Amino acid sequence: MKTPSLLRSLMSFSGMTFISRLLGLVREVAMSAAFGAGMVTDAFNVAFRIPNFLRRLFAEGSFSLAFVPVLTEVKETESPEALRELVARTAGTLGAILLVVTAIGVIGADWLVRLFAAGAVDEPEKFALTVSLLRVTFPFLLFVSLTALAGAVLNAHHRFALPALAPVILNLCWIVAALWLAPYFDVPIMAVGWAIFASGVLQLLFLLPSLARLNMLAWPRWGWSHPRVKRIRQVMIPTLFGSSVAQVNLLLDTLIASYLITGSQTWLGQSDRLLEFPLGLFGVALGTVILPSLSRHHVSTDAAAFSRALDWGLRTALLIAMPAMLGLVLLAEPLVATLFLHGKFTPHDVAMAGLSLSALSFGLPAFVLIKVVAPAFYSRGDTRTPVRAGVVAMAANMLFNIVLVAILFACWHQPADLEQGWVAALARVPGLHMALAVASALAGYLNLAQLWRALVKTGVYQAQPGWGRHLRRVGVACLAMSVVVLLGNHYAADWTRIPTWQRAGQLAALVAAAAAVYLAALLAQGFRLRELRAH
C-alpha cells in the first residue's frame, strides 16, 4: 500500500483537529459567559488540570512516543496476528494500571488538591468544591487514555482523521453542560464535571468501530511480562517526565497561582487553552504525523529518508509557528475580548487574561518545534536525552517562576499590601500570573535548545539545502504581517467598549488581512506549496 505524503497526512489530521479546537473555543466562550472568572472557575481549572495533565502524558506524550515505534516495527516486520496481540496486551496492561491510578485519584482527591493547590486550603468552600470536581473528572483519565491507544493504532495505519476528531465529543458535552444543564444542578459547575466524565466514555466508543474494521479490536489481556509490552514500558517510564515538561510546568504554575489573586487560575487556564489551538492544530499534528514516518525509516535503516522527514517537519513548524506566535502576542487582548467578554466576564478579566496569553504565546515556536524534535529521539529508542533536557528545563522553570514573580511583585505592590505578610500580599497584587507564563515560555526555549544541541551532536539529522532562503522568506513575511497587525490594532475601536458583533468583525478583518499579507509575502519571494511535499 502506498504511504500517504506527510503533507496530506498533516492536512487530514489538522482538518479534524481544527473542528475540535474551534469547538474548544466555543466551550471557553460558554464557560466565561456562564461562570466568569472567580472562585468557582479557579476550582474547576485546578480540578480538571490534574487529570488533564495525566491525559497529556498518555494521549500526547510518553505513551504515544513509546508505543508508536514498537507498533510500527511489528506492523512492518511481523504478521497481523502479532500486531493484534500487541494491541490486546498493551490495552490490558494500560487499562489495569490506569484503573488503579484512577481509584487512587478519586479516593485521595483531597490530598491531590492539597499538593497542587496548597493556596486553596485556607479557603474551605473553594477547597471542598475543587475536591468534589476532581473526584468526578478524574475517571476521564482512564477512558481518554484508552482512546489514545486506539488512536495510535489508527495513526499507525495512516488513519489520522478520526482520532483527531474524537475530542469534538469532549467539547460538545462541555458546551451542552455549561449552557443548558448547569442550571439543573445544585452546584452548577458540577454539570461540567459530569460532562467531562461522560465524554471520556463516548470518545472511546467512537473509535472502537474503526479498530474493528482494521481487525485490531481484541479483548484486553494482561501483558506486563510480554516482550513488546516490556519494551514499551521501559521506554515509557523515563519519557513520562521528559516528554511532558510543559505539562509538569503547568502543574507547578497551578501550585504557585493558588497563592495569587482570585482569578489567576482561570486566566492562566484560558491562556493555555487558547495556545492549545495552534499547538494542537500544528504542533501535536506534526508530532503525531512525523513519529510513524521516523520510526518506519529507522526500522528500514534509511538514514537519508529519516533526515528528510525531520527536515520537512522543522521547516513546516517554523512556517506556521512564527506567524501564529506573533499574531497571538500582538492580538492577545483583542482575541480575549472577542471570545470571552460576555456575561460574567469583565474588562478587567480581559486585561489579565491578555497579559498571560501574550506572555505564554512567546514560547509557541519552542513548544511546536519540541513536538517535532522529540520524536527524532524516541523513534530511535533514545529516552535519556529528552529526559535530561526535561529535568533541566523544569528546574529552570521553577527558578524563573520565583524570580519573575518576585520582580513583578516588587514593581507593582503597594506598601499597604504587606501589612498582613508577603503571602497575603501575593493575593492582592493583580498581574503576577503573567510571570508564570513568561517562565513557561523561557523553559520551553531552554528545553528546545538542549534537544537541538543533542540532535546536532548525534549526526542523524542533516539539514537539506535551502534553509537560508526559507528563514529569509519566513522572516520577511512575519515582518510584513506584524506591520499590518500593529497598524490595524492602532486604528481599531476600543475592544472592550464596542458590541460583540463589532469586535468579531474587527478581529476577523484584521486576522484575514494579516494572513493574506503573510501568504502574499511568501509567494512574492518564490515560495510554493510543493516545497512542503514529503513522504
Image (cartoon, rainbow, N blue to C red):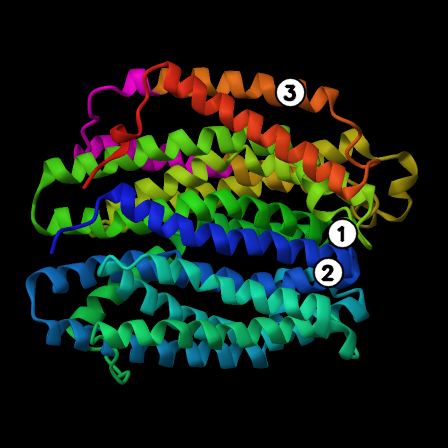
- Quadrant in which the C terminus appears: top left
Q: Which residue is mark 1?
A: 263
Q: Nearer the viewer, residue 512 or 87?
A: 512
Front of the two marks 1 and 3: 3
Q: Which residue is mark 2?
A: 41
Which amino acid is tagged 2? Thr
Q: Nearer the viewer, residue 6 or 450?
A: 6
Residue 511, x across and y down, in percent: 58, 31
Q: Main secondary structure of the magenta part?
A: helix
Q: Which residues are magenta?
A: 443-470
Q: Which residue is mark 3?
A: 486
Task: Identify the secondary structure beneath mark 1.
Answer: loop
Residue 447 magenta-drawn?
yes
Q: Are marks 2 and 1 in contact (CB under 8 Å)?
A: yes
Disc 1 crowd rating (10 Å Cα; few below 14, some 14-19, many 20+) is many
Query: From what the image shows, is residue 96 above or below residue 237?
Result: below
